[in-house]
Image: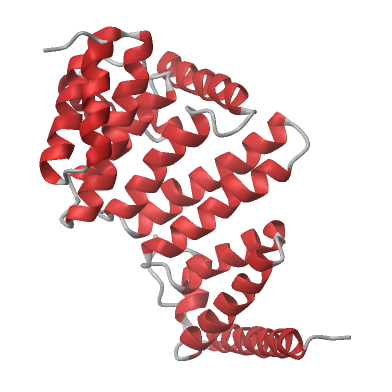
Amino acid sequence: MTCPCSHAGFKAFGVALFLMVCACGAWRLQPRTGTAGETQSEMIVAGLGGFRGLIAEVVWFRADRLQEEGRYAELAQLATTLTMLEPHTPEVWAYAAWNLAYNVSVMMPDAPERWRWVQAGLRLLRDDGLRLNPEDPVIHREIAWLFLAKIGGRLDSASPYYRAQWRNMVEAARASGDWSAVKLDKGRMDAVDAEYGTLDWTNPMASALYWAHAGLARAVRLEDRRELRQIVWQALMALSTERPEFAPRALAEMQTAYGETPSPFLRDLIGRFRAKFKLP
């Protein structure tokens, strides 16, 4: 038996897509006034005019249904459409990238295929999201977290493969001198080295620090600063296990974080970390 709400959802989704097609057709009849840096998809979405809010609402409805049903591959495609409809809403970029890098990737049968989807999520945030929202701390945070938890962490059984692939990419960029291939700026890398200590840039934790550092420079809200600061001290803690010289700076960042947003958990963690590394 067909669920009435499901039928209504499909019908509404079909109407929205019809409106999108009509709006795109209307756009094609308009004079081309887009700038040289404006992509075709951006100009098409601009041509949707008043239809865009309606379509976005229906797409969100459909996305919720797909998530409930665990249909993440379809959800990833739909979520990417949402970034076109709401390009200046950072949560939309975070939502779309999460589905690519976390939900869809783990459905893949082997590590190379998983890595392809993780990279897709990274590129969506870094190459598209930041291009449209260069000063947004939330998108910086999501990129930093991707390096900290997914590529550099142990959330995924394929993480060793991700780390090896990232190492190869960074080594190739260093050999060629073209850091833009991995979307790193040499001047900012030097600033991060000066701030936290000389890093091994083949380690994903260095990139976690890089993007969190950039986000902190743009964060105004206390919540954004707390989350970015947490990525900084977590990355430094991880680095400290291999290179204890990072431990004092990790402790300093944890103490700064505690000063901004105190919590019993962080207070206890500071105590254990200080004892582990015999820090004053």
Residue closest to the eye, 243 or 251: 251
Q: Position of residue 19 (x, y in %)?
A: 62, 90
Residue 234 quadrant: top left
Residue closest to the eye, 192 or 41: 192
Residue 70 quadrant: bottom right
Colour scheme of this structure image?
A: secondary structure
Quadrant into which the N terminus falls: bottom right
In the image, residue 85 above or below residue 193: below
Which residue is depicted at the point 52% across and 69% down? Answer: 82
Tell me if I can see residue 185 in this picture: no
In the image, residue 149 above or below residue 263: above
Q: Position of residue 159 (x, y in %)?
A: 58, 27
Q: Position of residue 33 (x, y in %)?
A: 40, 77
Quadrant into which the C terminus falls: top left
In the image, residue 134 above or below residue 188: below
Q: Is residue 26 left or right of residue 138?
A: right
Extreme-right residue of the structure: 1
**What is the total number of numbered labels drawn onto the structure image?**
0
In the image, residue 115 above or below residue 76: above
Q: Position of residue 224 (x, y in %)?
A: 24, 52
Tell me if I can see residue 267 in this picture: yes
Which residue is depicted at the point 56% across and 89% down? Answer: 26
Which residue is depicted at the point 46% across and 39% down? Answer: 146
Which residue is depicted at the point 40% across and 47% down? Answer: 142
Q: Is residue 178 left or right of residue 233?
A: right
Q: Is residue 183 left or right of residue 9?
A: left
